[in-house]
Image (cartoon, helix red, strand yellow):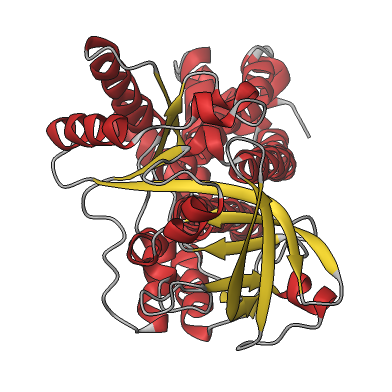
């Protein structure tokens, strides 16, 4: 029997028991669609999480600081802060290596925030207002921005403001230590208050203008970290909320391989220039992204395993029943000269056709559900977020193709073994089967 004849016969055999074939195809289609939809959803979540890490967590694409700052910077701040001259050198290297990239200096401060009657600790993140707008990218029109016209204006975490009973427009005082251990105080105005969405930071965090933090710490022109924003990022000029949310789910951030390549190039440039700098990628900086991605990857693997087990058992059952029902047919085919391998190939082709039809049906079902969910604007509040976001389902081609490939391989095994056993029966026994 030729290959084409084998395929044609397998296709006809597939529909001899339409009800069983339809049930198997539907189970395969629903299972495959579930896997494809979850893969598309997690793919969109990864894109959104990466953009949130870069823009909402203010991590940027790369972070540069003096070597050893992570472990010794708080103990010896004066020794590990970058000077204005070093910042200019780093700026020149970054501009040469990454034309169009933006370098954003940051300086943090810790101390006490007081309303005049009581005080509580605060952790301040100092950044220039214009740089903050650029770094926030798709979030630049959300609450929490700093303003150039308010040099003393700060954005306090909602929990921190509530502890001291501060409202937007109120004044307060901050007390912190300078680089040399002396106490320094300054008045601030509560320009805005936002919920960080994180219990650990909502009662401590405060965004402050970089110049204010530098004056407070007696560190004029200095910074502890330099954040790199790659070209083409952060220029969100539109106030269209839906457009920004769509970008969050559809505009992928640089991959880990791309980030590592740029990191290594900059590290080599700094070393050649005699600068002892450490460069970290946004993937290294965002523990939340790594943890959530690892969790979703594990859930996907578990879900894929369960769906594959159910679908493969369904295919195996359909093929086993077909083999038993067609034992006499197998004997007849063997009697007219069809080899054992031809019998096995016939049933394997039937299983592959089941997978093909089921996968195509599953893809159509995936496309329909994906379109419906994306249009329906179903919203939820994700972890570490303060506002609802729409559920968006993308399309993850690599993982969807992987699932289809695994299904095809397992279907071959599910059909091969019962067909092989039947093909090895004696012709007379097969012809006399009842």
Q: Give the image location of residue 206, x and y in percent.
A: 63, 63
- Left or right, 221 with reference to 24: left
Residue drawn where x is 48% and y is 37% of the image: 224
- Left or right, 90 with reference to 252: left
Residue drawn where x is 49% and y is 14% of the image: 341
Q: Nearer the viewer, residue 127 or 77?
A: 77
Compared to 319, does 60 lie above or below? below
- Left or right, 231 with reference to 155: left
Q: Nearer the viewer, residue 214 or 183?
A: 183
Residue 113, quarter of picture: bottom right
Residue 13 shows in the view: no
Residue 338, quarter of picture: top left
Looking at the rendering, in which quadrant would you find the N terminus?
A: top left
Looking at the rendering, in which quadrant would you find the C terminus?
A: top right
Residue drawn where x is 26% and y is 75% of the image: 237
Q: Nearer the viewer, residue 311 or 97?
A: 97
- Left or right, 72 with reference to 396: right
Residue drawn where x is 50% and y is 79% of the image: 372
Residue 41 shows in the view: yes
Q: Give the image location of residue 47, x and y in percent.
A: 46, 53
Q: Give the image location of residue 366, x and y in percent.
A: 50, 63
Q: Nearer the viewer, residue 320 or 431?
A: 320
Q: Give the image location of residue 199, x and y in percent.
A: 80, 61
């Amino acid at each position: 029997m030729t290959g084409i004849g084998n395929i044609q016969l397998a296709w006809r055999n597939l529909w001899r028991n339409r009800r069983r074939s339809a049930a198997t195809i539907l189970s395969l289609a629903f299972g495959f669609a579930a896997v494809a939809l979850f893969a598309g959803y997690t793919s969109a979540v990864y894109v959104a999480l990466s953009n949130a890490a870069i823009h909402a967590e203010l991590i940027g694409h790369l972070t540069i600081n003096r070597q050893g700052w992570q472990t010794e910077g708080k103990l010896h701040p004066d020794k590990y802060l970058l000077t204005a001259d070093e910042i200019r050198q780093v700026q020149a290297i970054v501009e040469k290596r990454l034309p169009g990239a933006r370098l954003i200096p940051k300086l943090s401060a810790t101390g006490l925030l007081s309303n005049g009657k009581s005080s509580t600790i605060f952790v301040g993140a100092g950044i220039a207002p214009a740089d903050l707008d650029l770094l926030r990218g798709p979030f630049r029109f959300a609450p929490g921005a700093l303003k150039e016209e308010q040099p003393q204006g700060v954005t306090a975490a909602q929990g921190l403001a509530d502890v001291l009973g501060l409202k937007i427009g109120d004044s307060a005082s901050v007390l912190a230590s300078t680089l040399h251990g002396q106490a320094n105080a300054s008045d601030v105005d509560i320009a805005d208050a936002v919920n960080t969405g994180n219990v650990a930071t909502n009662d401590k965090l405060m965004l402050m203008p970089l110049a204010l933090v530098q004056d407070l710490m007696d560190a004029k022109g200095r910074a502890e970290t330099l954040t790199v924003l790659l070209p083409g990022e952060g220029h969100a000029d539109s106030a269209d909320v839906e457009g920004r949310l769509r970008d969050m789910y559809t505009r992928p951030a640089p991959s880990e391989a791309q980030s590592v390549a740029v990191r290594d190039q900059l590290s080599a440039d700094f070393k050649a220039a005699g600068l002892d700098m450490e460069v970290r990628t946004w993937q290294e900086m965002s523990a939340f992204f790594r943890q959530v991605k690892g969790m979703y990857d594990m859930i996907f693997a578990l879900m894929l395993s369960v769906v594959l087990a159910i679908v493969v058992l369904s295919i195996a059952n359909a093929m086993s029943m077909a083999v038993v029902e067609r034992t006499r047919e197998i004997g007849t085919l063997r009697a007219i000269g069809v080899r054992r391998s031809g019998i096995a190939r016939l049933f394997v082709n039937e299983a592959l056709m089941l997978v093909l039809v089921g996968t195509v049906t599953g893809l159509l079902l995936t496309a329909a559900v994906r379109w419906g969910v994306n249009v329906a604007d179903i919203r939820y509040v994700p972890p570490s977020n303060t506002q609802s976001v729409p559920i968006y389902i993308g399309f993850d081609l690599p993982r969807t193709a992987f699932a289809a490939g695994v299904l095809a391989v397992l279907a071959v095994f599910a059909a091969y073994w019962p067909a092989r056993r039947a093909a090895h029966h004696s012709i007379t026994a097969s012809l006399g089967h009842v």
